[in-house]
Image: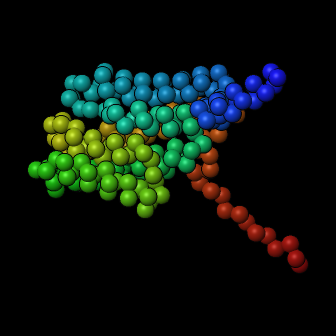
Amino acid sequence: MPGRIIKKQYRKARYILYRETLIDAREHILTFLGSFTGIALIGLLNSKYLVASDNLFLIGSFGASSVLVYGIINSPLAQPRNLIGGHVISALIGVTVFKLFSAEIWLACALAVSLSIVAMQVTKTLHPPGGATALIAVTGGKKIEAMGYMYVLSPVLSGVLILLAVALVFNNLRHRKYPSTPILKRRKVIRNTHR
């Protein structure tokens, strides 16, 4: 009888919990440390070194990227190509769309996000936080508007590179492996064994 109750409870629970949520405490610690370090480094640069120049270094989409890059490191959406490409492409599109359609902000928002999604799909760099990066380029206010295309280099590219550098360290501790496929694939040398 107790076995039946356990099985019944398990069947109910599996609809709520799935395999990826059932990780051990050490994984949680590494996820926390990686995410904390990545965001803290960007935040430190933003608050200590860039305040005098009135520059911006920390944007909201980095929080979403941290969930992917430190929390579900084997996801195709969390790989370096997607992280960098998704943000940079979306930032370029967001700035361009804002420059063209700033009079109609509702249209600029919709176009920036939608074009970014399609561009990421075409370039195989889909990274969901990239949509937020494009939207921030349109709705970010006077500070981001004044940055123009510099928004792509800083905060977007520079912040993403910091997140990636931290991910390469923390996501290769213990049994973790990041990126899930090698960045530079080695070519297989085929040797002629028949002589």
Q: Which of 89 and 149 is in front in this view?
A: 89
Task: Looking at this view, name the residue that lies furthest to the front.
Answer: 1
Q: Is 36 on the left or on the right of 45, as rendered? A: right
Mark yes or no: residue 92 visible.
no
Task: Looking at this view, name the residue that lies furthest to the right.
Answer: 195
Q: Where is residue 176 in the image (x, y as percent from the top left)?
A: 66, 35
Query: Where on the picture, by quarter, is residue 162?
Result: top left
Indicate whether 155 appears above or below 118: above
> Residue drawn at (69%, 27%), measured in percent from left and top?
9
> Residue drawn at (46%, 29%), measured in percent from left and top?
38
Q: Where is residue 137 in the image (x, y as percent from the top left)?
A: 25, 44
State the count of labels.
0
Q: Which of 15 and 41 is in front in this view?
A: 15
Q: Where is residue 110 in the image (x, y as percent from the top left)?
A: 26, 51
Q: Is 101 on the left or on the right of 162, as rendered? A: left
* Figure quadrant of the C terminus: bottom right
Q: Is 92 on the left or on the right of 32, as rendered? A: left
Indicate whether 130 appears above or below 25: below
Q: Which of 40 and 131 is in front in this view?
A: 131
Judging from the image, the colouring scheme is: rainbow
> Residue drawn at (61%, 32%), measured in percent from left and top?
17
> Residue drawn at (52%, 43%), measured in percent from left and top?
78
Q: Which of 169 and 177 is in front in this view?
A: 177
Task: Looking at this view, name the residue that lies furthest to the bottom.
Answer: 195
Mark yes or no: residue 156 visible.
yes
Indicate whether 55 appears above or below 148: above
* Figure quadrant of the N terminus: top right
Q: Position of residue 139 (x, y in %)?
A: 22, 40
